[in-house]
Image (tube, rainbow, N blue to C red):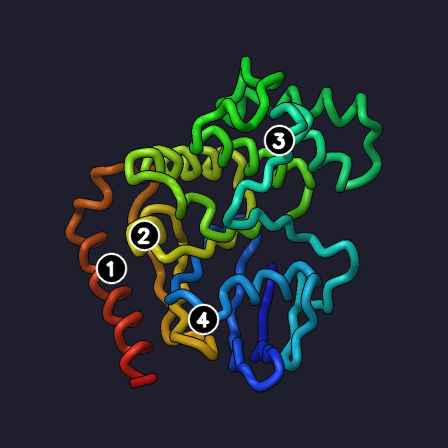
């Protein structure tokens, strides 16, 4: 379990996080929804240990985190190395995790290709892939790091609507099989509703939690789920929470 208590962060005179508190249970899919600039990515950088917090605390299974942190972060850009093949990019995750030689890392990466819909593309360079395939390769590299928790920072935000929907459905299916612990940053209310067990809404900078919502929609979820009255009602509640947070700064 991850618990964040009253987390605070500033850059000089700029307050970015103003007392964020949340928790994520093992195997849970939690989304963080909020406007641009509210500190969502900063929260991830603190969770991974890249940035220090100015106040508050993070607990992993009830204790302060040790190094290496049990979180793998997938940034907004796929950040695939163009000079590496798909297999070599995924193998980098195993190499970063340590304890794997290059040959073993390559073998493990090759074994992941079918799981992420990349079988037959192991020797392909990233610039020959579609946007959706690049994101699947980036997620495979993140999973390869072997961390307990995946931090996904708007992984589908730059994709067209059709590709984004396809990948959202794919991610929901693969998560149901693998049951990773996932924290997803998104601006997309429907994406959060489709994928999440719980959703936190952050207000504008400095970020703080303005709402927490349980998603009680049955799984597995598909396109029809989003057309249900319960999903529509939850979307309205989330949009209202976002609006209240924005109005509070006016």
Q: Earlier in the sequence, mark 1 or mark 3?
A: 3
**CA gap, disc 1 and disc 3:** 41 Å
What x and y, as percent, mark residue 120? Answer: 54, 13
Q: Which residue is mark 1?
A: 234
Left or right, residue 132 beside residue 23: left
Q: Which residue is mark 3?
A: 82
Q: Earlier in the sequence, mark 1 or mark 2?
A: 2
Q: Which residue is mark 2?
A: 193
Q: Secondary structure at mark 2?
A: helix
What x and y, as percent, mark residue 174? Answer: 47, 34
Q: Are marks 1 and 3 in contact (CB under 8 Å)?
A: no
Query: Which numbered circle lies on residue 92?
Result: none
What x and y, as percent, mark residue 233? Answer: 19, 59
Q: Secondary structure at mark 3?
A: loop
Residue 19 visible to the viewer: no
Q: Closer to the camera: disc 1 or disc 3? A: 3
Q: Earlier in the sequence, mark 1 or mark 4?
A: 4
**Front in this rendered view, residue 159 or 139:** 159
Q: Residue at x 44, y 61 (%)?
A: 32
Q: Earlier in the sequence, mark 4 or mark 3?
A: 4
**CA gap, disc 2 and disc 4:** 20 Å
Q: Earlier in the sequence, mark 2 or mark 3?
A: 3
**CA gap, disc 1 and disc 2:** 8 Å
**Front in this rendered view, residue 190 or 14:** 14
Query: Which numbered circle lies on residue 38?
Result: 4
Q: Closer to the camera: disc 4 or disc 3? A: 3
Q: Earlier in the sequence, mark 2 or mark 4?
A: 4
- Depicted 214 relative to depicted 247: above or below: above
Q: Quadrant for residue 214, please give it.
A: bottom left
Q: Are marks 1 and 2 in contact (CB under 8 Å)?
A: yes
Q: Are marks 2 and 4 in contact (CB under 8 Å)?
A: no
């Amino acid at each position: 379990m991850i618990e964040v208590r009253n987390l605070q962060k500033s850059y000089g005179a700029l307050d970015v996080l103003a007392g964020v508190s949340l928790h994520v249970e093992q195997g849970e899919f939690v989304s963080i929804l909020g406007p641009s600039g509210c500190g969502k990515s900063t929260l991830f950088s603190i969770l991974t240990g890249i940035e220090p917090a100015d106040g508050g605390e993070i607990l992993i299974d009830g204790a302060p985190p040790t190094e290496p942190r049990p979180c793998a972060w997938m940034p907004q850009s796929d950040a695939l190395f163009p000079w590496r093949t798909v297999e070599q990019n995924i193998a980098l995750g195993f190499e970063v995790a340590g304890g794997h030689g290059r040959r073993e890392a390559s073998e493990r990466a090759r074994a992941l290709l079918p799981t992420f819909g990349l079988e037959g593309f192991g020797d392909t360079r990233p610039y020959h892939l579609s946007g959706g395939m690049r994101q699947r390769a980036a997620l495979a590299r993140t999973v390869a790091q072997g961390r307990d928790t995946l931090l996904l920072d708007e992984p589908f935000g730059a994709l067209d609507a059709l590709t984004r929907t396809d990948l959202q459905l794919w991610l929901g299916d693969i998560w149901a099989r693998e049951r990773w612990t996932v924290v997803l940053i998104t601006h997309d209310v429907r994406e959060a509703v489709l994928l999440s067990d719980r959703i936190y809404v952050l207000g504008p900078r400095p970020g703080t939690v303005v709402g927490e919502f349980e998603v009680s929609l049955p799984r597995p979820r598909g396109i029809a789920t989003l057309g249900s009255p319960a999903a529509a009602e939850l979307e309205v509640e989330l949009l209202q929470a976002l609006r209240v947070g924005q109005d509070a700064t006016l």
